[in-house]
Image (cartoon, helix red, strand yellow):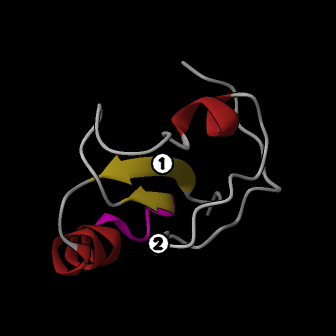
Amino acid sequence: MSSPIPVVVCGQQAIILQDVKDRLLPEYEMIHGILHPIPGPGPSPLPALLRGEKPNDPENIGTKAYSRPRPLS
């Protein structure tokens, strides 16, 4: 079995993001959960994620498994 595909999920409520995270497994792995709408208050961690950087986002409920880069398709 191949490793899950890393994804980023955006939402407004942590409880919903947690449910999505659980339902994505085992095919997808939510490595980062953005807890505010885009555009929203404060800087978005999405640009850092797309550059392959670890964003400073204390509200992230994802797995934070940033070390397995995958090509964008």
Per the rendering, the mark at residue 34 is none
Instruction: List the residue tagged with mark 2.
Output: 59
Marks 1/2: CA–CA distance: 16 Å
Magenta span of residues: 24-31
Indicate the position of residue 3 as horizontal and vertical percent values.
64, 60
Q: Quadrant of residue 48?
A: top right
Residue 25 highlighted magenta (yes or no):
yes
Task: Name the element at disc 1.
Answer: strand
Residue 36 higher or lower than 72, as above or below:
below
Disc with the residue nearer the chain's start (1 vs 2) = 1
Q: Which residue is mark 1?
A: 7
At x 50% / y 70%, what residue is drawn? 62
Q: Is residue 61 above or below residue 30?
A: below
Picture layout, residue 39 above or below residue 13: above
**Residue 11 placement (x, y as % from top left):** 23, 55
Q: Secondary structure at mark 2?
A: loop
Residue drawn at the location 29% of the way across and 53% of the way down:
36
Q: Nearer the viewer, residue 52 or 26?
A: 52
Which amino acid type corresponds to the residue marked 1 in the rendered image? Answer: Val
